[in-house]
Amino acid sequence: MTTHALEVRSLTKVIGKKKIVDDVSFSVNKGEIFGLLGPNGAGKTTIIRMIVSLINRTDGAVIIDGKNLDEQFKETMSEMGAIVENPEFYKYMSGYKNLKHYANMALKEVSDERIKEVARLVKLEDVMHQKVKTYSLGMRQRLGVAQALLHNPSLLILDEPTNGLDPQGIREFRDYLHTLASEGMSVLVSSHLLSEMQLMCDRFAILEKGKLIHISSMHETTEIDDAKEVIFEVDNSQEAVDIVKEKVEASSFKVLSDNQFSVTVNRASISTINRLLISNDIDVYGINTVTATLEDRFFEITNKGAREGQMQ
Ligand SMILES: Nc1ncnc2c1ncn2[C@@H]1O[C@H](COP(=O)(O)OP(=O)(O)OP(=O)(O)O)[C@@H](O)[C@H]1O
Ligand SMILES: [Mg+2]
């Protein structure tokens, strides 16, 4: 049996009479970026806080690289690096001094060399001796990652790491996570931004009101094998649709413009349509499959399209 970087079994949190996290189980493979996705209040932060032992579990187990957190607390904790909510830094101290402070609190010995190394990794080496109050939000976020990486963990846990970052910052952060994962780091990341998770994660789980309601790989979710919406670029879309309609059974033909029409068909019909068009002297300039976005799938799965305004 392969060991997972992280395995969460029947995680449950009850506060008062409310089940905030209800029997949640999932695992993160080694070198994988795994997303916890869900609207505000779904329980993402609570799950992460339980995994990193910031709060007690009501029930359930956390297994890190095959080791049970309850049985091997120090070993398992030292395998994890985390940013939970916004990382706190001393604004009037330099980035270096802040990292030094965290290094002193780490469960493992952290050398000065390692501090320099993580500063380089997150591309902050040039500003390490500037006060944190002079850092931009993106730089502070990267300092947070540096702090989480200090003790060389194998599992990085990030709660809404791109909160407040601009598109450029989000992109850089994403690229950076991919680099870390390609070097073997396993990552658990939470977000309520569907589009962002789509680009960031290999697999993800959807949480709703404390319950895990869906788990799958990004590939499975966004690639639907049967009928797909396909957009054809042609020189005369109305004529093309009239020709194809006679031969191909589909009720979903839409003329989008003079040069584009769309139709929802299975894979085999795409080539049939293409051949039909060409044999009827209609030039085809492009055939594009419209992939379902994670957002489309999210609303299909949770059946909460009406809540759209709440999600970003
Ligand atoms: N200490 C607490 N006492 C009572 N209720 C709490 C406590 N902590 C969290 N909750 C409730 O538990 C639910 C889940 O909260 P949590 O912060 O885990 O959600 P989240 O998915 O991280 O949301 P967000 O996207 O807003 O960060 C919410 O309804 C919240 O009000
Ligand atoms: Mg949260």
Image (spheres, grey):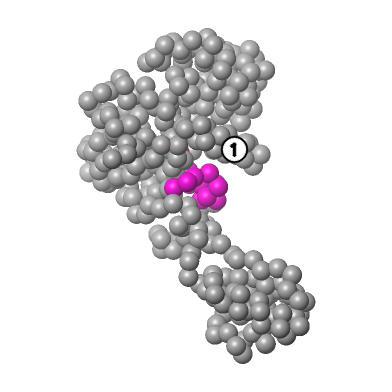
In the rendered structure, which segment of residues is drawn in magenta? 189-203
**Residue drawn at 45 percent across, 40 percent down:** 32
Is residue 124 shown left or right of residue 40?
right
Membership of 191 in magenta stretch:
yes
* Residue of label 1: 175
9 or 28: nearer the eye? 28
Is 291 rendered above or below residue 41?
below
Is 93 rendered above or below residue 195?
above
**Residue drawn at 67 percent across, 87 percent down:** 243
Please indicate, yes or no, whether residue 92 appears anywhere in the rendered image: no
270 or 165: nearer the eye? 270
Label 1 SS? helix
- Where is residue 229? Give x, y as percent: 57, 70
Q: Which corner quadrant of the image does residue 74 belong to?
A: top left
265 or 56: nearer the eye? 265
Q: Amino acid at mark 1?
A: Asp
